[in-house]
Image (cartoon, rainbow, N blue to C red):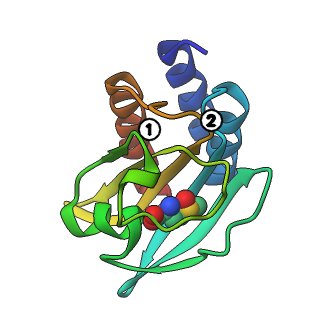
Amino acid sequence: MDYFLALSKIKGIIRMKVNVLQNVVDFLYENFDNYSWVGIYKVEGTYLVLGPWKGLQATEHVKIPIGKGICGSAVATGKTEIIPDVNADNRYLSCFISTKSEIVVPIKKDGKIVAEIDIDSDKKNAFTRDDKEFLEKIADMLAEHI
Ligand code: SME
């Protein structure tokens, strides 16, 4: 789906104020073929804890220490991580053998990271600068719903 149209639909989902996180996760999973698994991790103390997610399989990584994995690194640095080839990154914590690339986008509230969007793709190099900009806008919109 076109990013611009998707943003307007996501604004609509957020305006409903019902089940916002799960509905946005579902929307992303259902409308972007490259997004093979979509989840939101929330910061709880020194851990990331898995919240709403959608994909074919559940992950065993439901609690990740901050600083560990791609997810934990994105919280530690506060920056979006794009991993074109997960097998070439030794920080990577494997969830699904089908995953080839990953993007992790921090969600900030009052300058503090409170959560993050984590998306796995079964395609190598799946995430572009456009995905990054798109998902960072969504992260901003979700901040008040964490
Ligand atoms: N691959 C992540 C762990 C979460 S799963 O992708 C759902 C990481 O390296 O932190």
- Tell me the residue that label 1 is attached to: 138
Question: Residue flagged by tag 2: what amino acid is it?
Answer: Leu
Q: Where on the picture, by quarter, is residue 32?
A: top right
Question: Residue flagged by tag 1: what amino acid is it?
Answer: Ile
Q: Nearer the viewer, residue 85 or 128?
A: 85
**Residue closest to the far front:** 88
Identify the element where label 1 is drawn: helix
60, above or below 7, in the image = below
Q: Residue at x 53, y 30 (%)?
A: 11
Q: Could you give the CA–CA distance between mark 2 and mark 1, rounded to whole angstroms?
A: 10 Å
Q: Nearer the viewer, residue 54 or 20?
A: 54
Q: Is residue 97 left or right of residue 56?
A: left
**Residue closest to the far right:** 56
- Look at the numbered discs 2 and 1 and tell me whether their residues touch, using CB distance below 8 Å: yes
Residue 92 in the image, given as x and y percentages of width and height: 43, 63
Residue 40 visible in rendering: no
Closer to the chain start, of discs 2 and 1, is: 2
